[in-house]
Amino acid sequence: MRSQLALMAIASLLLEGAASATPVAVSATLGVEVGIPGLPPVVLAGGGAVSVMGGTITVPAGLVSQVGSLTIPVTGTSSIGSLVATGIANHSGAFSVGGVTAQAPAELCGAGPGAGQACNVGGRLGGVMALTGQIFIHIIPHITVIPLKLNGLLIGQGGAATTSFASIDAGAWTSGTGRVGLATPSGTTVVSATGASSPLNLVTPTFVNLLANRLPIFASFTLFGSLTVPEPGALWLIGSGVVGLVLLFGRAR
């Protein structure tokens, strides 16, 4: 009887652990890259604590948060003088096991992406997390400025939108591959970026047609820390197995 109670207590602790959130300290980087040849990415660093519960990592808003503005000189092309990034930060988000299959199934690639579309392929973890802030691309010699408002472009959120000055198609975040389809004279060219599960590196693809500029935009979000995310129900199965042993043990006696 005491053995049965001990096994039941273990099962209870395991199941309780599966239902409680664990804070994990992490460092993080957030990058945004606009697909213009020679244009460097905007990369920011931050850190803090994320919450891990079952198969989900929940990220608080402002884990990466820019103070002031950042000017990046551009040397890879003669037509663009600089990038200026202001106020870039992450909103809160949650990434779950099952990837976009479970979190944002409408963002999965089918036969595409077609021209003007963004989509995700596979990935163990996925979900939705919006970004805030702006990137200004300074074009020379006529000093034209292309403004990219990250939240308005649905980066990291998924979905499609059309405004008076832009058409947008965005995918969710994934640890798999994000793809964007671009129209070319010979057909559709697909560009992509790939994430990873360890360290956790998530990518999100976005197509933007802005002021006659057809741009693929890829953002990346990487977490460094002791992140171990069990499959959903794994702890439940372990606990259920212990309960089964209790019943079997009781019958054997």
Image (cartoon, rainbow, N blue to C red):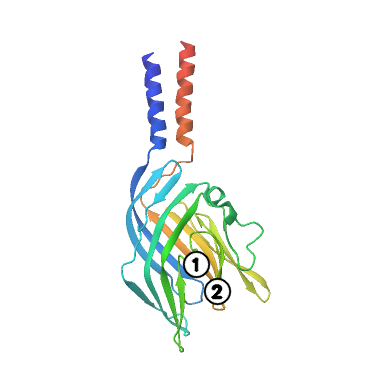
**Where does the image place residue 65, in percent across and percent down from the top left?**
34, 63
Query: Is any atom of residue 209 visible in this view?
Result: no
Q: Quadrant of residue 117?
A: bottom right
Work out whether residue 236 or residue 166 is closer to the camera in this orientation and state it.
166
Residue 100 in the figure: left or right of residue 32: right
**Residue drawn at x 37%, y 53% as measured from the top left:** 60
Label number found at residue 164: 2
**Residue drawn at x 36%, y 15% as measured from the top left:** 2
Most extreme residue toward the top is 253
Q: Earlier in the sequence, mark 2 or mark 1?
A: 1
The correct choice, above or below, for 170 with respect to 141 in the image is above
Quarter of the rendering occupied by the N terminus? top left
Q: CA distance from mark 2 to mark 1?
A: 13 Å
Label number found at residue 122: none
**Where does the image place residue 126, in percent across and percent down from the top left?**
50, 52
Q: Amino acid at mark 1?
A: Leu
**Where does the image place residue 8, in percent across and percent down from the top left?**
40, 22
Query: Is any atom of residue 189 visible in this view?
Result: yes
The correct choice, above or below, for 121 with respect to 213 in the image is above
User: Mark 1 highlights which residue?
Assistant: 153
Count of residue discs: 2
Q: Quadrant of residue 73?
A: bottom left
The correct choice, above or below, for 235 with respect to 35 in the image is above
Most extreme residue toward the right is 186
Residue 219 in the figure: left or right of residue 120: left
Mark toward the viewer: 2 or 1: 2
Residues packed near mark 1 inside 10 Å, few (<14), some (14 to 19) or many (20 plus): many
Most extreme residue toward the bottom is 141
Q: Quadrant of residue 162?
A: bottom right
